[in-house]
Amino acid sequence: MHRLSLKIVGAQGQGVNSVGEMCAKGLKRTGYCIFGYREYMSLIKGGHSSYQLDVSHEMIRSSARLVDIVVTFNHHGLEKNLRDLKPGGIMLHQTPRWKFKKSEDLAFIAEQKIQVIELPTEEILKKLKAKAILGNVLITAVVWALLGRKKEELEELVREQFGHKKDLLAMNLTCIAEGFATREVLAPTVTLSLPEPNPQWKDHLLLTGSQAMGLGIIHAGCRCFFGYPMTPASPLLTVIADLQNQSKMLVKQAEDEITAAQMMVGAMHMGTRACTATSGGGFDLMTETLSLSGITETPAVFILAQRPGPGTGLPTWTAQGDLHLAIGSGHGEYPRLVMAVSDSQDCFDLMPEAFNRAEEYQISVMVLTDKQIAEALFSQQPYDQEKAEVRRGKLVTNVEGLKALKSADRYAPEVSDGVSKRWLPGTDAATFCGQGDEHTSDGTSTEDGQVALAQMEKRMRKMEALRGVLPEPELFVVESGKSVVSRDEPRKVGSDDASVDVLVVGWGSTKGPVLDVLESYKLEAISHKQSIGYLHYTYLWPLRTERFVALAAKAKKIILIEGNLTGQLGAILKQETGITIEHKILKGDGRPFFFEELSSLIQKQL
Amino acid sequence: MSIPLSTSGPKMQDYASPVPCTWCDGCGDYGIWGATQRALVGLGLHPWQVLMCYDVGCHGNGADKMSGYRFHGLHGRVIPLSAGAALANPRVPVIAFGGDGASFSEGVGHLVHAVRSNYQMTFVLHNNANYGLTTGQASALTAQGQKMNSSPNGIPEETLNSMDFVFSLQPTFVARAFSGNIPQLTEILKVAIKHRGFAFVDVLQACPTYNKFATHEMLLERCYDANKEGHDPADLAKARALATDTSARIATGILYQNEERPAFHERLVARQGMTTVPVDEVGIVDMSEYMKELV
């Protein structure tokens, strides 16, 4: 696959994101698939940050470790990001009269044939009498010229953004012209080679995982959102809050995570759809409420956006370290559903399902995401809006049904699937107590051992009922034996027709890089005698294991890939199936899996 | 021939529960329990029309001692739970009950923000100045120096002046009552439940088993109805002074009320002009317009 990687670096607040976003939008509109990745530090101004775009005319879902061009806003990037460049890469900088002094840097530049280009941004802006902020457009224009793209494409973009401000638009257009002219003077022969665009990407959405999840939550009919800021869940709170005037959703920033969780459960008990979102530490505070909703059988939806712990950990980096937390959190034993999103498609599609399952089974649903998904930029086919439906399970709302209810229907333990009828305060029916103490069928508290056991068993029966209806993990395979690049998407195949030599198992955000690696020519050529399949777990608890067991029995090798240090999914699979996955690719440095990195780690295992 | 009976208004027996009360003889919870039912009947509210939420404690054991939609949640968290419920459906009156331990220690932050946010709900403080159900430990409202369970040498901390604290938060409704005066408490609760915003009702009650310093007899002797003595609930400065100074007598009644300040949900710009409430609105939302912005 032909992929090109651009990395924009600088101090936070210098314009890294503006240039990144402009390039991303422009390239997508031109007909490229974009995968964007942000790194930043947990401070407001000054920390070294980056915005990387990986670009292709084909589907691309991961970031490369090495890039074709680094655009740096300050001299720190010259030194810090020099080794992010591929051989022959371009270092475009704006530090007047910069000279590399360290001998190892000079040697690296010479050996790797790095092209260092100084863009005299300040001087140009001074000449144009343009404000500093216009430097972003100037830089973007230079990059655009290096990419061999047309000036008009960029002009259209600024026209759209500044069309209503005549003077500003004129200045933007001037900067674009100047950018193209400057490139002709500074680096007429330097180019970044892009493949031919593919118009299919033009109409795709360009959005972050948080935006995708926000749309999914609104689409699902969630009407109340209770949050408390904590990276990487805060971007979702921002998205939901910024859309509230359009969605008319009730959005509340609570005083703490306990409040957010309690408000969500209160709102769900009253009968709307509500959710809350947080990261590990905030989720820890929510877990008593999670346990409460277990015994009161109140539907609840928790978004758990992972970052590396323990403690405050690495606040602005990524991890898949909270799977066991989600499965084991909260005191006592009670049913729950844990699912994980992997990309912008899941972020949208799984939200209606999270609410449906929460209401159908009257349980807490935890949706795991992570910093990588929350902040990554995806090229997303416009969402199919016909797929989602509202399923509210055994909620009684019709007058006749309500009239027939008895208080003891609420927690009637006889139900085979463990799910009894539910109805809402304010509806004309027999009343009950949503009871956090162990209780009889109408919510009267009890300490009777037999009644307590019947209620415990009733609730836990939901897990088996749920396990029976959840989808098996999804299998992706690339056909084996091909000596040329496979341009096909990995095919989804049914559980009964597959047998793979190498079975890769994972969940969450590792899906993107795994699929890109599986598709790549390199791996295909090396492994042409082995068929490889990737088994991706979306639903993690209760865990379905039939497909995994069947594939594992035939596979010559199983490789576990997870963004944590202990192999948490592997441990659960072992617990549930007895199968030990010997080969593990694990990561605990807060970074996502990069394309070449994962490719070489998988190859070593083959 | 059958004589048609009026079915319009609720009756006390509608709120009856087959579960007998389990509080100690002389517990103030009985009075609050009785006055709550009387207030709801007095307001013409049927059991299915209200939601009552209970914290954990002796009072919380009352969650199944009367009819109505009820929720018995976690210790210290009854306020945010109730606020969430009230935001989801402001048409249903929500009454939260919590003790002084839950409200001034475990969940004190929630009280602060509920007053500040002015959620549409009533909060009834079961104020017996100790942790009863866990067998008599000191709360923040226990008198300093008292020997309590787990404080054999008397409690070293200063006693929190709860009323001064609440008034510092700019409340819109503050009342104080005594659980032994059921008719007055009933009338206070009726006003509180109808109040626009967060109604704080501090009910002083005896804990005959563990509270030896503020007994039923002491409260009976000291409490007086300030409204009957001419106190105007619109007078904030006077209300605060009356509420905080309990050295000689204890002022009860509706001490302060201000309905000019909108409740939280009324202030939300995004929800202006909505004729529905969030519980009415659950359904798939078309995202076409949202997606256009992202191409």
Image (spheres, coloured by chain):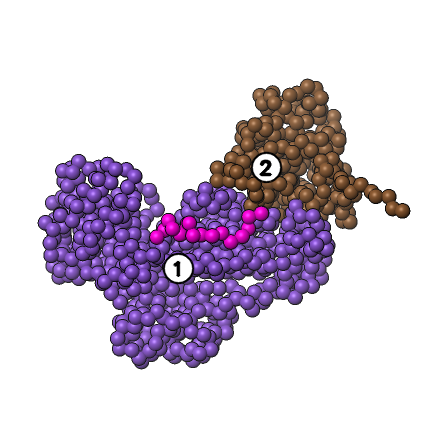
Chain colours: A purple, B brown
Q: Amino acid at mark 2?
A: Gln
Name the residue rendered at 64%, 21% in the picture. Answer: B232
Q: Is residue B154 above or below residue A16?
A: above
In the figure, is residue A389 to the left or right of B188? left
Span colored in magenta = B279-295
Query: Which residue does the numbered mark 2 point to in the structure image?
Result: B120
> Which residue is nearer to you in this view: B182 or A355?
A355
- Are both tags, 2 and 1, on one chain? no
Near mark 2 (Cα within 10 A), the count class, few <14, some 14-19 or many ≥20, is many
Q: Residue furthest right?
A: B1
Residue at 50% across / 67% down in the picture? A471
Give coordinates of residue A603: x percent, y percent. Answer: 30, 72
- Residue B170 image offset from top left, x and y in percent: 54, 29
Classify 10 Å Cα crowding around label 1: few (below 14), some (14-19), many (20 and above). Answer: many
Instruction: Identify the secondary structure beneath mark 2.
Output: loop
Mark 2 → mark 1, Cα distance in angstroms: 39 Å
Asked whether residue A378 appears in the rendered view, the answer is no
